[in-house]
Image (cartoon, grey):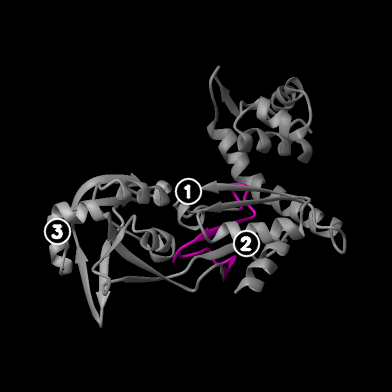
Amino acid sequence: MKNSVSPDDLSVLLTVLREGGFRAASRRLGIAPSNVSATVTRIEAQLGTPVLRRTTRSLHLTDAGQLLVDRVRPLLSALEAACHEVATLGAQVQGRLKLNVPGAVMPDILPSLLAHYRARYPNVEVEIVVESGLIDIVAMGYDAGIRYGSVLEQDMISIPIGPRRQQMVCAASPEYLEARGVPQTPEDLTAHDAIRYRLDDGAMLPWVLQNKGRSVRVEPKNALILSVGALNTGLKYAQSGLGVIHTFHNWIGDDFDAGRLLPVLPDWRSELDGPRLYYPNRFTPAPLRAFIEICQGES
């Protein structure tokens, strides 16, 4: 049949999209770039319509290509996962683990888990992509994702990863507090410069401070706004005296001990549920299954 495209060819097309180009896909697949290009051309000839728009700098799916990818990507992902799961049953765990995570878990939650994981499973290549928005991990080619307090699809499982509860606190450099004064109440923060974070959807991360059953939402003056993807870099700006920062308590203990930063309103804190690992409830490949066991063992 003219419109019959082989799963192998479709897998090459998905690799081109996942890796961002023909050359990157050829390196991932271990074949020549010309063979990758020829495969895409063959798909288009068999379907009788273009699936990619190519320029010298980028490539984009056509409407027909988007429809094709949306339909076949979940099917091929499930097929690949099922085959990999069967192939690795009872065997050494190997392959790739690809995670999509928010920046908040990068400094202290993931390093110890991945160190433990790599020590036990050295033949697994781990890839991490950092972004804050909730995504369809199956459609985007990830094994699992990590998010805070997100509403997940019904066919997803989630488990806690890292601390079950986390606290956020305010802090500033000694130099800043000496020059501007020490806030005594949450309302005092409205007169202070702040280092804030903006979410991908444009909203600012709120400052909601809690103490003895009282909750106060504060809107300080924005001295510096950072993308939420750069979450842990804000400490450097706070240490430089740019303003007050509202950040994870577990990130800032060393700065308090060294005197680089001082607590601001130490009795007022924010509490939130810790992050969760989420993944499809079927065809869990061996590298992900092993990572889940590590996460549960650390709980």
Q: Earlier in the sequence, mark 2 or mark 1?
A: 2
Stretch of the chain drawn in magenta: 138-159
Please tell me whether residue 45 belongs to the stretch shown in magenta. no
Residue pointed to by mark 3: 181
Camera-near label (2 vs 1) is 2
User: Mark 2, residues whose alpha carbon is within 10 Å: few (<14), some, or many (≥20)?
Assistant: some
**Which residue shows up at 69% across the image and 31% down it?**
25
| Side (left or right) of 109 relative to 229 | right
Q: Nearer the viewer, residue 73 or 268?
A: 268
**Residue 126, x across and y down, in percent:** 67, 49
- Considering the numbered disc 3 on the image, is that residue within a helix, a strand or a loop? loop
Q: CA distance from mark 2 to mark 1?
A: 19 Å
> Up-down: is 76 above or below 249?
above
Q: Amino acid at mark 1?
A: Glu
Determine the secondary structure under disc 1: loop
Question: Of residues 257 and 88, which is closer to you in this image?
Answer: 257
Who's the residue at 72% across and 34% down the image?
28
Q: Is residue 48 visible?
A: no
User: Do labels 1 and 3 touch, CB within 8 Å?
Assistant: no
Identify the residue position indicated by label 2 in the image.
Answer: 113
- Tell me if I can see residue 65 in this picture: yes
Label whose residue precedes the other's in the sequence (2 or 3): 2
- Residue bearing the label numbered 1: 131
